[in-house]
Image: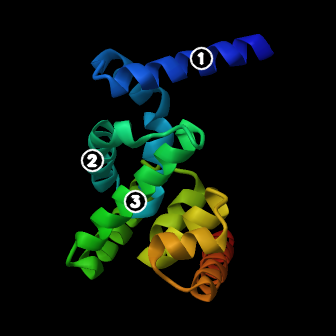
Amino acid sequence: MLQQLDTSVDHEDKDIARAIAGDVNAFQRLYQTYVGKVYGLVLRLCGDRSQADDMVQEVFIQLWQKLANFRGDSKFSTWLHAVATNVTLTELRKQKRWYQRIIKAGQQVQQEADSGAMDLSELDRYVMKLPDQTRWVFVLAALEGMRHEEIADQLGIAVGTSKAQLHRAKQLIEEWANHDAA
């Protein structure tokens, strides 16, 4: 089992080195390995499937362009997580009509719930209803396991604000879950 793990790590290291050298097939293997995890992170951060599709593409475009910057100081998956988070948050910050996006996401969640076409877990449904910054903090802290100091640096907010946003997210999710259960 350990040897099998070492072999998969060796293959990944080789794919990373080959992709840095411009091997598209090696990059494709990295893409196939990580696209699901990146999509989950991006979807939870942005709260909209069509936006998530676009942003995941942008993440992998940026990854291709920045791959030579990967020094191996951390695991590739950790570095990719940081790239995905940065790209997503940068794209979200560029959007000028935040309020309309929140309304649209809320309407989409409600339409999907009404039609019975929801394939997201209950938690994901509630997460998508959270306001942007609250959702970002919740996803990064509760779902991705980041510390408040890292979140504060990532989002450009105070550590106390991160803690308050996480507390608020938990309160809202609990309220919504209790309301739905009633």
Q: Earlier in the sequence, mark 3 or mark 1?
A: 1
Q: Nearer the viewer, mark 3 or mark 1?
A: 1
Q: Are marks 1 and 2 in contact (CB under 8 Å)?
A: no
The label number, if any, that marks residue 10 in the structure image: 1
Secondary structure under the numbered disc 2 in the rendered image: helix
Q: Earlier in the sequence, mark 3 or mark 2?
A: 2
Q: Circle 2 is placed at which residue position?
A: 58
Which quarter of the figure has residue 1? top right
Q: Amino acid at mark 3?
A: Asn
In percent of width and height, residue 59 lies at 33, 46
- Viewport quadrant of the C terminus: bottom right
Image point 63% across, 74% down: which residue?
A: 149
The label number, if any, that marks residue 154 in the structure image: none
Q: Which residue is outermost to the right? A: 1
Q: Is residue 73 left or right of residue 34?
A: right
In percent of width and height, residue 136 lies at 49, 69
Q: Relative to 8, does residue 50 appear above or below in the rendering?
A: below
Q: Relative to 1, does residue 117 appear above or below in the rendering?
A: below
Secondary structure under the numbered disc 3 in the rendered image: helix
In-front residue for pair 117/98:
98
In-front residue for pair 175/13:
13
Q: Amino acid at mark 1?
A: Asp
Q: Circle 3 is placed at which residue position?
A: 86
Q: Amino acid at mark 2?
A: Glu
In-front residue for pair 134/80:
80
